[in-house]
Image: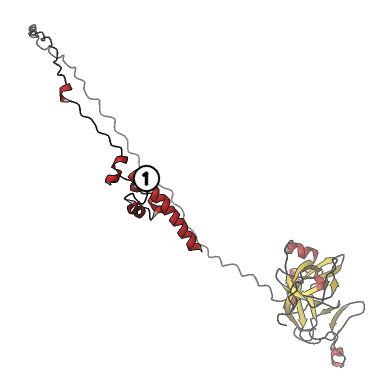
Amino acid sequence: MFWFVVFIIWLAGLAFCGRQYYKRRCGVEPSPDEPGISSAAAMSLLWPVVWFVDDWREPAPCRHAAHARYHRTEEISQPDEESFVPITPSPQPAPEPVLNIPPPDPEPTGYVPPSAPEPIAYVPPPAAPAPIAYAPPPTPPVAPPRVVVNTPPPAPKAAAPAGFEEGDRVRLAKPFWGSAEPGQKVLTWDPELEHSGADPTVAAGDEGTILYPDGADAELIGQMKLESKYLVGLDDGRELYSGGPIPGVGGATLERIPGHYDVYRKQGTVYIRPKFNDGDRVELLESFTSTNGNHFEAGWEGSICPLTVTMAECWKTGTYPVNLDDSPSGANRGLVTVRADMIKLAPRAR
């Protein structure tokens, strides 16, 4: 159907353009009796293009004898030779002769001898300048020789003993038997209790935080590190002293675990609070329902993700935004802000 429509349009354009071309070339409407119909149709076959061809828009008149009467011709009449009248030029007056007047002779000029030049007075050259007395250059001062004193390099500062810093998280590698003195709450190693067959006071694997005495200076802290004598604030609220009577004998065996707690004191009371960093993997320690009705279960894991606050603000307030992992079914558990004591570092491997 499309090509049929195209053919009809082309055929109509051929008829129209062929008619225009024939009228411009032959000067008469085309008819079957008139000659030149086939040549006009041939010139108009490509009628969408020939519109831009000058020979098609303005064709030369045809040479058919039958159409000669339709073409307008004009003859340019030539003037008759007899119509030309010769015009004789009027006589011109003869020019007046020009008289040759010789120039006047120049007046003779008398010879004037040159005047003698005036004598120039002799000016003797100026006297030679007085000689300048020679002044020897000043002797440069002689600097005394530099005395090199071999100063021994300063003795290197003693490196701080390696050990735990306050706030480090530790775990008991072995069971600990201890008891507190009357009026004291710190557990110290009790060898008699250890050999009595009683259950350990603190089980192996219990975790805590390294503490230093209030007001301890750098010297005391260095001594405690050197002898591995630490105060440990257990997560259950108790405290123990890890040192024994002799370094390496008795006491508690501690090992470092990931994590760090903030330790601060207020009115003689020591407070500890978990401290996390951006991107830490954490786990909820308890179940709760938020103010908007969303329920969160203990054991859910996520990552610390401070989007609208800085980590410094999180450490100061003790609250952290946690981006929880999606549920096994793919549901989005969202972002929740919790207190530091409601989360802990998630195990590296589940």
> Which residue was labeled with disc 1?
23
Q: Quadrant of residue 70?
A: top left
Where residue 242 sits, quadrant-wise, is bottom right
Residue at 38%, 45% in the rendered image: 29
* Residue density around tag 1, few if under 14, some if 14–19, many if 20 or more, within 10 Å: some
**Residue 24 drawn at (x, y percent):** 36, 44
Using the image, determine if residue 169 lies above or below residue 250.
above
Q: Residue furthest right?
A: 182
SS at badge 1:
helix
Residue 222 or residue 52, whichever sits in front = 52
Considering only vertical position in the picture, is 14 above or below 191?
A: above
Compared to residue 43, the image places residue 343 above or below, namely below
Q: Quadrant of the C terminus?
A: bottom right
Height in image: 98 above or below 39?
Answer: above
Q: Where is residue 130 in the image (x, y as percent from the top left)?
A: 29, 30
- Quick one: 219 or 114, which is closer to the camera? 114
Colour style of the rendered protein structure: secondary structure
Amino acid type indicated by mark 1: Lys
| Residue 63 at least partly seen | no
